[in-house]
């Protein structure tokens, strides 16, 4: 039993519904609702410290590409059981009219994060790829920035 519904706000501009949304889960009839209080609290922290500040900075409405993933959904798409998406600590973002590299650099340079990864960005098409970002807690974040080209991860130094 959960003490919130999908319309519950996680931050000023974001609701739980946006983080539970998954077209794959819907198509495959996989329950992708948040039931654990810890996961709900993690999503609140992620929104308050990462997603909402991104929205406030760019001033462009957006919804996450991929937020929370139930363990069943995460396994179905072939991701590791240790994915921070399962814990409510990670989100994949793209913002219309914002270069994904610019989004990545804003998070890397201005926010306190656990990991930020510019994934599948080709350096030519500004909308290629997406930005994966996670948040654990102010004291436990690693502030690790990386790129991923589909094969290799590369640490980005300041």
Image (cartoon, rainbow, N blue to C red):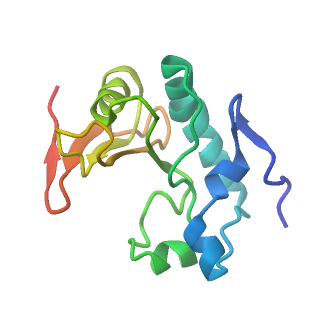
Q: Would residue 38 appear left or right of 51 to someone viewing this image? A: right
- Residue in view at x 41 percent, y 25 percent: 111
- Residue in view at x 49 percent, y 72 percent: 74
Quadrant of image for the N terminus: bottom right
- Residue in view at x 31 percent, y 27 percent: 102
Residue 141 lies, in percent from the top left, at 40, 38
Q: Can residue 70 be seen in this view?
A: no
Residue 31 lies, in percent from the top left, at 68, 74
Of residue 107 and residue 37, the one placed in the foreground of this image is 107
Placement of 65 over or under 80, stated as above or below = above
Which quadrant of the figure has residue 105?
A: top left
Numbered marks: total? 0
Residue 62 lies, in percent from the top left, at 57, 36
Which quadrant of the figure has residue 147?
A: top left
Of residue 10 and residue 140, the one placed in the foreground of this image is 10
Quadrant of image for the C terminus: top left
Q: Would residue 16 appear left or right of 100 to someone viewing this image? A: right
Q: Would residue 146 appear left or right of 59 to someone viewing this image? A: left
Q: Can residue 15 be seen in this view?
A: yes
- Residue in view at x 18 percent, y 45 percent: 122
Residue 29 lies, in percent from the top left, at 67, 80
Which quadrant of the figure has residue 28?
A: bottom right
């Amino acid at each position: 039993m959960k003490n919130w519904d999908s319309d519950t706000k996680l931050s000023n501009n974001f609701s739980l519904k946006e983080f539970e949304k998954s077209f794959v889960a819907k198509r495959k009839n996989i329950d992708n609702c948040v039931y654990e209080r810890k996961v709900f609290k993690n999503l609140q922290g992620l929104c308050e410290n990462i997603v909402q500040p991104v929205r406030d900075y760019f001033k462009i409405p957006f919804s996450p590409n991929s937020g929370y993933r139930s363990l069943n959904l995460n396994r179905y798409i072939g991701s590791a059981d240790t994915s921070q998406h399962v814990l409510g600590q990670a989100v994949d973002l793209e913002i219309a009219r914002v270069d994904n590299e610019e989004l990545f650099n804003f998070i890397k340079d201005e926010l306190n994060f656990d990991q930020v990864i510019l994934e599948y960005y080709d350096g030519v098409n500004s909308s290629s790829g997406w930005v994966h970002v996670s948040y654990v807690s102010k004291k436990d974040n690693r502030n690790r920035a990386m790129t991923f080209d589909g094969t290799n991860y590369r640490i980005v130094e300041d």
